[in-house]
Image (cartoon, grey):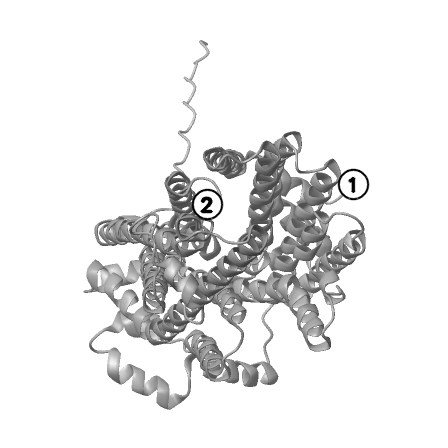
Amino acid sequence: MNCLPIVGRELRVAARKRSTFWLRVAAAVTGLLLGSGCLALSSAQGTSTAQMGSVLFYVLTWTCLVASLSAGLFFTSDSLSEEKREGTLGLLFLTELRGYDVALGKLLATSLRGFYALLAVLPIVAITQLMGGITGAQYWRSSLALVNALFFSLAAGMFISALSRDSQKALAGTLFVMLLLALGGPVADGIIAGVKKRGFLPVWSLSSPAYVFTAAGVWGRSPYWKAFALTQLLGWAMLALACGLVPHTWQERKGAGARTSRGWAYSWKYGGARRRQRLRRRLLERRPLAWLACRERWQSLGLWAVAILIAGGFVTGLLLRPHQGVWIFWNYVGGLFVLILYLWAASQACRFLVEARRSGLLELLLVAPVTEKEIVGGQWRALVRMFGLPVLLLLSAHVAAATLSQLSFQRIAAQTATVTTAAMTNQSGTISNQAYATSFTVSVGPGTNSARAGTNAAVARPGFRVASTAQQAGMAAAGAAAAGLSSGGNLLALGWFGMWMGLTSRSANLATLKTILFVQVIPWFVIAFGSTMVLGIVMARLFSGSTQPTMWFAWWPLLSGALGATAALAKDIGFIAWSRKKLLLSLREQAGRDLGHPRFAAPLPLPAPPPIPPVITVPN
């Protein structure tokens, strides 16, 4: 008897896929490009080989950690729920297969690509050990922590997929579980440490795969193995729950209780009778496609709740006037919410056309008196109607918080300059105005004595001086506005390109992954490393040596933000124009293409009948 037959079949199928090979090649090429960029930038700045190895190690491993934690979102969160929607999962249980056969088969089939991609990057990471700055124990513990994070993410996706039937809800549920388990523990321990006014003590953090990775690089003793064992236990527990739930959650329940819950679910998803009637009255006659695409209200309500929560927290912070370091932390939290918003926009933009093509609705629309422009424009108007105002509120709060964060960053840099100057003065006795002007040309803001204010009046390099608080505020506002403009352009590009990916992809999760990769991830790496290398080389030549250390703090955020925003806007305009043109010109052609799930298969021609043998007569 064949043991685990589904596992063997799925592994053979996954090994023969072209995506398994190309994803491994793409991961290795990405690792080589990241390493080359870090080495080029470090060489331009005159960094030692050991420091190069340390920086390159952390850049590569943190990138692999983010990719490993994201694997469950796109690979396993819709693996079982897709089979439920197509009605093929129940056919498997008509045989002698068990829940673990199906769950393990899906897990190994979807994890093979991610595991091969991680294995392709690890030899590149091992080069940093030869460069110095990284020990062999750190490398092996970090590699094991990355494999652990990949398994944890895939197991969480399988668990949510066993409970869900809708692809978008499965994606959102997996994202919530990963954020809760990966970040919830460290945040809880940090809050406890702040309230009790003591050092950070990992208790809840032991359940986080991200903490396992951070503990792998710690010198000396750390709770690495304890956290590794606990996360492994949680991962296997979620996988065991998925195996146990699959045989009992594949079918749709019918009955009185199910009808009652379906009524509540329908009202929550589409709103009450008055809301549905009002929406039909407004949109059905003028823009029927917009009405069809924006009927669901639960996503809009969820985004409104997040926007109000962020805006309320920002206003509360303004009223309480917290420490300047709080705004820097708030900026990073806002950046995390913006990334979640990118994922949300890509998923929603892909969803309508994927479902319309798979159900045959798109073909019915194309034979109706509806043009391609009306179909594309209707979906875009629906997206703007559902998410326009909450997205605008979120971006406004993010830009305002980024402005305060830049101001706090500049004040910390100014205080660093003041402390450094005082230390140099105490050591050498007196510093001449000329030497001080050569060393520090950044104003330290109000509150300094007249001697330092007079000293700051001397300028060593014209054009690279922040002389007043008003100029600092202007620089911070310009950098934050550039970041907000870039975020808005990214959302527009994700929406248009996501519609095209939804038309040309087999599943919603695959379309979402392609949209995030092509519009955001790959261009971000190119723009970030390109702008960092250019600015690093230019500023290293302008501010060579350690004579002007605070100039980097003052001008780096503004210049990098302006250069990155310009490149990002050019990229977004290109994606929007290309996607809109492809949608309008190729909508009818793509709607009729077979993407692997044909609903109407043409019958094969019948084989030709064999020739009739000749009749041989026997003579009398």
Residue farthest to the top, as pictured: 619
Q: What element carries label 1?
A: loop
Which numbered disc, 1 or 2, marks the residue closer to the eye? 2
Q: Is residue 118 above or below residue 288?
A: above
Residue farthest to the bottom, as pictured: 274
Q: How many labels does the image show?
A: 2
Frontmost residue, 544 versus 203: 544
Q: In which quarter of the image is residue 299?
A: bottom left
Q: Quadrant of the N terminus?
A: top right
Q: Position of residue 328 (x, y in %)?
A: 50, 66
Could you tell me the amino acid type at mark 1?
A: Met
**Taking 385 as reference, is 341 left or right?**
right
Residue density around tag 2, few if under 14, some if 14–19, many if 20 or more, within 10 Å: some
Q: How far apart are marks 1 and 2 (CA)?
A: 75 Å
The answer to whether the residue labelled 1 contacts the one labelled 2, judged by CB atoms less than 8 Å apart, is: no
Q: In this view, does 92 lie above or below 411?
A: above
Frontmost residue, 280 versus 294: 294
Q: Is residue 506 visible?
A: no
* Residue at 55% in and 64% down: 170
Q: Position of residue 77 (x, y in %)?
A: 57, 58
Residue farthest to the front, as pictured: 429
Mark seen at residue 161: none
Q: Position of residue 268 (x, y in %)?
A: 48, 82
Could you tell me the amino acid type at mark 2?
A: Thr
Residue on which the image places disc 2: 547
Residue density around tag 1, few if under 14, some if 14–19, many if 20 or more, within 10 Å: few
**Taking 188 as reference, is 605 left or right?**
left
Residue on which the image places disc 1: 1
**Taking 8 as reference, is 81 left or right?**
left
* Residue at 38% in and 68% down: 399
